[in-house]
Amino acid sequence: MRVIGPGHEIELANRLVVEGMPSTDEARVMGMLRITIAETPTEQKWTVEGRLVHPWISELKSTWMRTRTARRKRGCVVDLTGVTFIDHDGEKVLAELSKQGARLIATGCYTQYVVDNIEMKKIESPAVKKGVRRE
């Protein structure tokens, strides 16, 4: 087991859990974010739970960057089923993960709406760059 920076990392076999907890006053506003990463030979599965807001967005981004080598050419699934809120910056980070090949999974109405918007923008993006308009 090892502890790093503002969050805690616990590495056991092929699982990585990153948890962050703000001070008591901040917790009332920001909540908590938990990222669990399970490794298989074919994919890396991320389970994200809590509120995807500042400062946890930077924790998600840094964890994504730190695990890039471990992903190599395997697929990556990001399960957002346990996410309760995503702010605008959180949407940007999820869009970036999606552009880099992560498959986003959501089940709740709110989270599914956010994921659908990200995927729609990803589909429309090349057409907009080429000057093609979708009607």
Image (spheres, grey):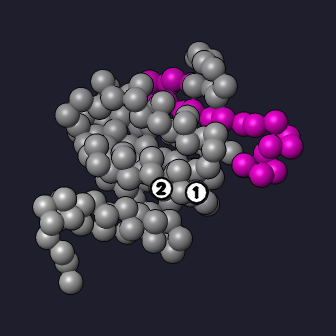
Q: Nearer the viewer, residue 133 or 53?
A: 133
Question: Farthest residue in the right direction?
Answer: 25
Residue 91 marker: 2
Q: Which residue: 19% across, 77% down?
A: 134
58 in relation to 82, above or below: above
Residue 62 marker: none
Question: Is residue 114 left or right of 4 when viewed as pictured?
Answer: left
Residue 26 image-quadrant placement:
top right
Residue 97 visible to an observer of this rendering: yes
Q: Is residue 46 shown in magenta?
A: no
67 in relation to 130, above or below: above
What's under tag 2, amino acid-wise? Glu
What's under tag 1, amino acid-wise? Asp
How many marks the image carries: the answer is 2
Residue 87 marker: 1
- Give the magenta-colored segment's residue range: 10-30
